[in-house]
Image (tube, rainbow, N blue to C red):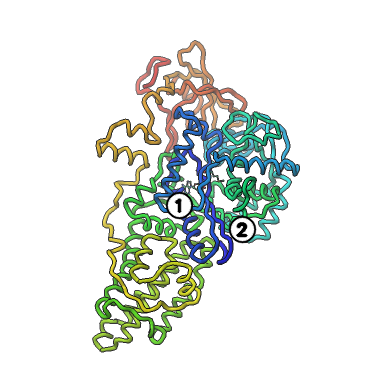
Amino acid sequence: MEESCKNVYITTPIYYVNDVAHIGHAYTTIIADMLARYSRLTGANTYFLTGTDEHGQKIAQSAELRGKTPKEYADEVSGKFKALWDDFDISYDKFIRTTDDEHKIGVQAAFQKMYDKGDIYKGDYEGYYCVSCETFFTEKQLVDEQFCPDCGKPTNIVKEESYFFKLSAYEDRLLKWYEENEDCILPRSKKNEIVNFVQGGLRDLSISRTSFDWGVKLPESMNEPKHVMYVWLDALMNYITALGYGTDEKEMKHWPASTHLVGKDILRFHSIYWPAFLMSLDLPLPKHIAAHGWWTRDGEKMSKSKGNVVDPKLVADAYGLDAFRYFMLREVPFGQDGDFSQKALMDRINSDLGNDLGNLLNRISGMSGKYFDFKVSSKDVKKFHQKELDEVEAILENVEEYLYKMQLNRYLEDIWKVLTIANKAIGDYEPWNLMKEGKTDEAMALVALITNIMARVSLLLDSVMPEKIGKIAASLGITINNETYTSLILNKELIADTTITKVEQLFPRIEEVLLEQAKPAVVEKAVAEVKSSKKEEKIEEDDNLITIDKFFETSLKIGTIVAAEEVPKSKKLLKLQVDLGEGRNRQILAGIKEFYSAEELVGTQACVVANLKPAKLMGMISEGMLMAAKDENGLSLIRPETPKQIGTKIS
Ligand code: ME8
């Protein structure tokens, strides 16, 4: 974010449509919304972009699993994201979808430009691909020769004709950019990781795929109908196609981005590929790429595939949207991970919001009502309270800096210091005694001091809690806009005479957790539906639940392990021959060597996923998978309690 009178362009990642929105997504979007609202208040010409990322193998597979076309599926989930942000009153200026025609045209224009420049060439890609992360890896990068180093899922071997982007040619320019722009990647600790990574050397990037077709086609002039663009090239371009790059460029005046807000999982794409693409396109680079940490549940990253997500709508409905926003921004230092806890949320509501903020407003309306018929005049504030005003101003002068550095929790911490000054002043000056002593002017000055502090705090908190601050401002008789911001915050003026109106209690105390437990969203929803005795079909529509037919698409069988041996050079893999009663043994490579020896397995039974597509691991075919469960105490194979006939179906 930059100072006022400038163009400010703030973006969230565009979210994949294979996931329901959870509090991780809400977190990014709420931070971006806060920055955008603040920026508008300061008078900057602000543009705020969010949207959905709808192409790629992952989405195509998710759609197929549900028996939908990718577009049908994308329409449905993208609609849910948009509805949630609308429900949360997120102040985006544009919601982009990568299936929008303008976007596709823009991406093709960018591809063409990079190609014409000589930055794209055709070759063959051979390596590993993680569909879940939509990322290419070299063999060296894999964990145990097989698993994605980012998400831990198995990778696929990909061997196909591909176009490449000359990423390696941008290594030096990227390093120079990092060096010359101290805050281009925030926080600093994350920047160091990126610099180290790039110093380790960059390989050219495969930017087209031929093995599936759910993606943006290459420009027609290239006559390559088999190729679609790599989903990350397509996705990153959204930040410029949303402004009309390659179509109607009238909004391009907002470029370059002030802040690309991202989670740390996707920082590499944003701080290496994206600036390199932009250099190739001769466009200026973003000012800041700011990476926040993860919200976890019991220490694990929240994600739908892990089934540990918290539904932000449930939390906001239970505790209030503004309280939820405040909590997210205040609780965890930007860049660090945070475990979601309702207890912590309740504490913030009862203490920070109820006691410190809400109560102060009650005291203003109580004192002004009792002593002055709700009228407040600032005329003697300077005379009696210059000291407090100076203290407040010394703090507030520096808070904006925290926003530029993305230290949002410190921004809020300091605003709370100002509230403490106000609460303390009431105790120190005891207006009830001043009134008794007939020092009416002094009592009025004190009430006006508190009212002025509350007015300034309101301006600074409006972006964090727009709804509640709207109510506070109305109660104080002020309007939250750029004019008031300029007068009270920049010029440090005092408010004009005003009349206080009483408001209901803004943050009622919460005595016990309101959500039984923040269970995965689908479970919560399903339980709620059953409780309200709606029809069962309704549950089936909910994102994660499957029908029994779907379950039976997986063929699970009992097999006997007839032979087992270690795979040389592999820490994890054992090579097994498993009899499923098919007249021949299946070869199955299982990552269980750390937990079982080859000898002890021979002659035992296991549950086998029998209809998996064969996969190649370390150059050997694997024709199935053993079922196992792993926790902190180790891994156990799932087996029948008593021996069963070979090939018995599991149901
Ligand atoms: O990566 N904690 O989309 P995505 C905090 N389509 N934030 C989280 C989170 C968690 N547990 N889980 C997700 C993609 N997020 C690409 C982006 S941009 C050109 C393309 C947030 O749906 C966080 O901002 O997987 C993370 O970066 C983003 O959601 C990933 O969303």
Q: Earlier in the sequence, mark 2 or mark 1?
A: 1
Label 2 crowd bin: few (<14), some (14–19), many (20+), radius 10 Å: some
Locate residue 537 relative to residue 266 in the image: left or right: left
Mark 1 lies within 8 Å of ligand 1 (Cβ measured)? yes
Name the spot of residue 282 as percent of width and height, x first.
Answer: 70, 51
Q: Quadrant of residue 360?
A: bottom left
Residue 326 vs 84, above or below: the answer is below
Residue 50: horizontal and vertical position, in percent? Answer: 51, 49
What amino acid does circle 1 point to? Tyr
* 344 relative position to 264: left or right: left
The disc label shown at residue 292, or none: none
Query: Which residue is tagged 1?
Result: 27
Q: Looking at the image, how many numbered discs can be counted on the residues?
A: 2
Q: Which SS class for mark 2?
A: loop
Quarter of the figure that contains the C terminus: top left
**Image position of 571 with respect to 648: above or below:** below
* Quarter holding residue 589: top right
**Of 443 and 182, the residue lying toward us:** 443
Residue at image point 45% right, 52% down = 27
Residue located beneath label 2 in the image: 287
Q: Label 2 vs label 1: CA separation?
A: 21 Å
Query: Does mark 2's beta carbon lie closer than 8 Å to ligand 1?
Result: no
